[in-house]
Image: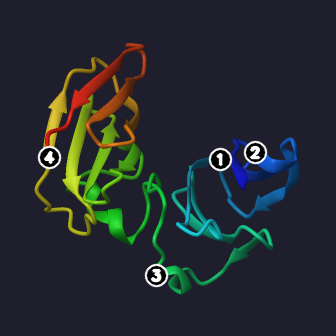
Amino acid sequence: SKLAVASHDNRIYLYDCRSKYKKLGMLKGHSSFVRHLDWSGNSKSIQSDCGAYEILFWDADSRSQIKSGSTLKDEKWATYSCCIGWSVQGIFAPGMDGSDINNLDRSKSGTCLAAGDDFRCVELVRFPCINEECKRKKYKGHSEHVTNVRWLHDDSYLISTGGADLSVFQWRHKT
């Protein structure tokens, strides 16, 4: 099994977890710091986005960039935290730009997408979210921007963290 680490030096570092975290190599191609990354369900591919609002795809075994993202159009991603991509393009409401959404997390069931934004809100939408007019539920509580959101293993709670308010919230999710 492998560990992928996103870095502010525009690279992703890969490590072998079974060999005392021996460095396997790096994925190099982003033009800005790497913000998010996701593994495919079979752990053969990685998708990542960066501060320049580009999404790149990688072959984890060969550690090479997959130049044609369409080859992964039907890929089942184990996680989905990248803020850029076809299946999350609707998360940006009219008038928003790429910097307004700080983090995403798709529920483990694969049906709900949570977003933390610059407007102190945690938002929930259905996944995939391909239309900016999608129905969304907004929840307020943070006094500053929401820096991260993550679902628990069974989708029963969503955890969100705040920026300057230094808060951690637990949101109960009823299905």
Q: Residue at x 33, y 34 (%)?
A: 118
Q: Quadrant of the N terminus?
A: bottom right
- What percent of the width, then of the height, locates residue 89? 32, 64
Q: Is residue 121 above or below residue 143?
A: below
- Badge 2, how many Cα within 10 Å: few under 14, some, many 20+? few
Q: Residue at x 31, y 60 (%)?
A: 110
Distance CA(mark 2)–CA(mark 4) = 40 Å
- Badge 3, how many Cα within 10 Å: few under 14, some, many 20+? few
- Badge 1, how many Cα within 10 Å: few under 14, some, many 20+? some
**Residue 175 shows which numbered tag?**
4
Q: Secondary structure at mark 2?
A: loop
Distance CA(mark 4)–CA(mark 1) = 36 Å
Of the residues shown, which amino acid type is indicated by label 2? Asp
Mark 3 — residue?
A: 73
- Say how the picture is coloured: rainbow
Distance CA(mark 4)–CA(mark 3) = 28 Å
Of the residues shown, which amino acid type is indicated by label 4? Thr
Q: Earlier in the sequence, mark 2 or mark 3?
A: 2
Distance CA(mark 1)–CA(mark 2) = 6 Å
Q: Earlier in the sequence, mark 1 or mark 3?
A: 1
Q: Earlier in the sequence, mark 4 or mark 3?
A: 3
Q: Are marks 1 and 2 in contact (CB under 8 Å)?
A: yes
Q: Is residue 62 above or below residue 135?
A: below
- What percent of the width, then of the height, locates residue 162? 38, 22
Mark 2 — residue?
A: 9
